[in-house]
Image (cartoon, rainbow, N blue to C red):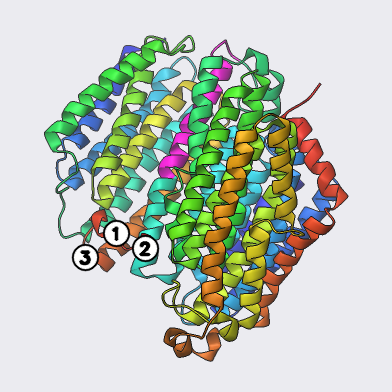
């Protein structure tokens, strides 16, 4: 059974989502998403306390190193060149996005209750937290206009998906899990480079300026 | 382990390209790597080495189809790459060369993957290696296209990962099993999969891989990306990425069929297919940019593939045939369009005309390619599309066949309108201003010609070895008792 400690970590994961929705300065958002990723990295260790294998350690270490240090490092580097460090004029106001976030959490809990979950994760917070994080990540991507905020939304989406994947961590080969983490790393690396070029080219990270291509 | 070499060899060449400090000679690594890869592919297709990595990599009938096609397309384009990079000596081609070779490694991995997790990793790697290729021109427009491609593509592919996890849950929901997400094992235990999970998984996987494929309404990145990408990158995306994503969907479809729920996937694919063809036909009538035109044509052909795949065994056979036709024809079109755009110095019908005078060979390839892509006999696409229409009638989908033909007609109007506008008439000032170094060379003309010739050959005399492989793939994906 999933222990109480895991539930606590999952609450922190969802709180990180809400924190980003409330839209503090971008640097704080990057830290929140980094903490979220590190919290997720702890879960395999807590889930399989009965018998840690090299596999468990590898995944936990990989996630913490990647999501807690490497990716935030790259994002901070991209942010350093930005003149303004806060999300401006989102398409949906900050308080409204918090309310929407609450609604999405309720939806995730209801959905998870309806799904025929495998024995072992039924009743735990793992699946609701994962689904809520996926949905809030999507919300951030579609409502924020800064390129950096969209990358953070993508990372939240990815974190939610990986949280769901943790229910399967014993079934997936190490090769696949490593591949997934590698792809996330390279993806964010390329996005960070593109963000820096967008800043140089357009003088800001506002994606609303990217409107030259149309019929 | 020799299957792994198909991935490792291009990867090693990619690293070598990145390490080499010679902008002039570096591009030659592309055709060298492609030739080694093609030789190995030929050898492995002849002498099947058996699975590798615990069954996660294997060369099944579908893999043979995709791998063979990618090898032909990439080798043809690699020769063009040298000619293309030679006319841009001022641009640093280190990232471009390395990413193009990494792209070959990723697509090879995708065509060999028997594990849905590994397949996802490979398709995502394909996407990522293509992103720096899009940004090769380093201007504001290509930056915008790259960003949209990255964001839409990443979200789409992330949803496919969630779908993959749902697929695994469909296997494990009833209790622990071995070989989770391994394609042959999933087909074998089709009946014992959890149907609710499977249904959710299929929706997410079709949306995810459909975004990569660029079916409407998930195609919005496509005109921007194809419009801004160099011709060779367009050929790789329209011929390679779409093929890999489509065949990923075919594997998903085979699994849900094994579970007895195939009708649901068929209806979804049919709806997406018709909608894609309709959207593409309408946009082809309004667009004024001949590279964006190719993107909408690609959306149209993805619709054709989806419809074929939704029509059962005979339709699937035609769709696999069309995969080859589409990739080779698109390759020829993108490569010749690249030559035309370079010499014209512009890309809309308002600024470009008379290219038959400026780039006579490319213009001829472009017009002939247009005839091929709009399914004029005796090119390959005519025969595969004819088979799809006949299957639609035979399976009682007369309305689908009618819509299919109607969309083809409108697409034909849209495509001919643009192509003849840029080819006919007198060259505009922008084309007169471009220097002689942007004219045609053997290196930039022969590859599209060869790809077009291959498309013609597929139509005139479809090789029996290909036909047998398509039949074997259909039998594996949709077994008929």
Instruction: Name the residue rendered at 30%, 42% in the picture.
Output: A141
Q: Viewer-proximal residue, B235 or A30?
A: B235
Q: Do marks 1 and 2 share a chain?
A: no
Residue position marked by numbered label 3 in the rendering: A203
| Chain for disc number 2 | B
| Chain for disc number 3 | A
Name the chief secondary structure element in magenta. Answer: helix
Whether B164 is among the magenta residues is yes
Q: Quadrant of the N terminus of chain A?
A: top left
Q: Quadrant of residue B378?
A: bottom right
Residue A101 appears anywhere in the view: yes
Instruction: Name the residue rendered at 58%, 30% in the picture.
Output: A173
From the top left corner, tell me how far across and down residue A30 is, in percent.
Answer: 25, 43
Q: Secondary structure at mark 3?
A: loop
Magenta residues, start to end: B154-176
Residue B4 appears anywhere in the view: no
Q: Quadrant of residue A98?
A: top left
């Amino acid at each position: 059974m999933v222990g109480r400690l895991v539930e606590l970590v999952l609450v922190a994961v969802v709180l990180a989502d809400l924190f980003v929705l409330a839209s503090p300065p971008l640097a704080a958002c990057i830290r929140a998403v980094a903490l979220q990723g590190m919290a997720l990295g702890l879960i395999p260790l807590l889930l399989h306390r009965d018998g840690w294998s090299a596999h468990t350690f590898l995944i936990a270490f990989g996630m913490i190193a990647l999501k807690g240090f490497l990716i935030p490092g790259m994002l901070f580097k991209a942010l350093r060149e930005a003149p303004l460090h806060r999300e401006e004029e989102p398409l949906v106001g900050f308080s409204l996005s918090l309310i929407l976030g609450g609604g999405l959490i309720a939806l995730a809990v209801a959905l998870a209750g309806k799904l025929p979950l495998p024995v072992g994760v039924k009743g735990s917070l793992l699946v609701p937290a994962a689904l809520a994080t996926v949905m809030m990540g999507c919300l951030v991507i579609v409502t924020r206009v800064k390129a950096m905020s969209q990358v953070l939304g993508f990372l939240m989406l990815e974190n939610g998906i990986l949280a769901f994947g943790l229910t399967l961590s014993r079934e997936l080969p190490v090769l696949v899990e490593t591949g997934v983490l590698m792809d996330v790393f390279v993806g964010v690396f390329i996005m960070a480079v593109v963000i820096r070029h967008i800043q140089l080219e357009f003088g800001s990270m506002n994606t609303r300026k990217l409107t030259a291509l149309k019929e | 382990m020799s299957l792994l070499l198909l991935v490792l060899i291009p990867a090693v060449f990619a690293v070598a390209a990145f390490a080499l400090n010679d902008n002039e000679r570096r591009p030659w690594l592309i055709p060298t790597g492609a030739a080694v890869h093609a030789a190995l592919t030929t050898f492995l297709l002849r002498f099947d080495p058996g699975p590798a990595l615990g069954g996660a990599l294997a060369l099944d009938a579908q893999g043979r189809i995709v791998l063979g096609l990618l090898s032909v397309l990439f080798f043809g384009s690699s020769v063009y790459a040298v000619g293309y990079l030679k006319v841009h000596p001022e641009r640093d081609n280190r990232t471009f060369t390395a990413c193009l070779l990494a792209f070959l490694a990723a697509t090879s991995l995708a065509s060999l993957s028997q594990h849905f997790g590994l397949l996802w990793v490979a398709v995502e790697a394909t996407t990522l290696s293509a992103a720096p290729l899009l940004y090769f021109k380093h201007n504001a427009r290509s930056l915008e296209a790259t960003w949209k491609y990255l964001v839409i593509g990443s979200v789409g592919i992330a949803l496919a990962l969630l779908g993959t996890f749902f697929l695994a849950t469909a296997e494990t929901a009833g209790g622990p099993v071995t070989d989770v997400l391994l394609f042959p094992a999933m087909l074998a235990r089709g009946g014992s999969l959890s149907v609710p999970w499977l249904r959710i998984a299929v929706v997410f996987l079709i949306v995810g891989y459909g975004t990569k494929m660029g079916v409407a309404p998930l195609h919005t990145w496509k005109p921007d990306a194809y419009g801004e990408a160099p011709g060779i990158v367009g050929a790789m995306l329209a011929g390679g990425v779409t093929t890999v994503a489509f065949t990923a969907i075919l594997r998903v479809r085979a699994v849900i069929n094994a579970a007895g729920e195939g009708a649901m996937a068929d209806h979804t694919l049919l709806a997406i297919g018709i909608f894609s063809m309709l959207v593409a036909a309408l946009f082809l009538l309004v667009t004024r940019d001949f590279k964006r035109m190719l993107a909408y044509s690609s959306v149209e052909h993805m619709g054709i593939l989806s419809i074929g795949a939704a029509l059962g065994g005979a339709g699937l056979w035609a769709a696999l045939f069309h995969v080859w036709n589409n990739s080779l024809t698109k390759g020829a079109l993108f490569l010749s369009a690249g030559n035309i755009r370079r010499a014209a110095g512009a890309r809309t019908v308002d600024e470009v005309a008379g290219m038959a005078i400026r780039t006579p060979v490319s213009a001829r390839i472009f017009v002939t390619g247009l005839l091929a892509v709009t399914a004029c006999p005796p090119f390959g696409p005519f025969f595969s599309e004819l088979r799809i229409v006949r299957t639609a009638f035979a399976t009682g989908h007369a309305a689908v066949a009618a819509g299919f033909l109607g969309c083809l007609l409108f697409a034909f109007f849209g495509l001919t309108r643009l192509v003849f506008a840029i080819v006919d008439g007198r060259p505009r000032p922008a084309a007169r201003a471009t220097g002689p170094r942007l004219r045609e060379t053997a290196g930039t003309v022969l590859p599209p010609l060869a790809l077009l010739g291959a498309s013609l050959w597929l139509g005139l005399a479809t090789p029996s070895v290909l036909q047998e492989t398509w039949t074997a793939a259909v039998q594996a994906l949709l077994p008929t008792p």
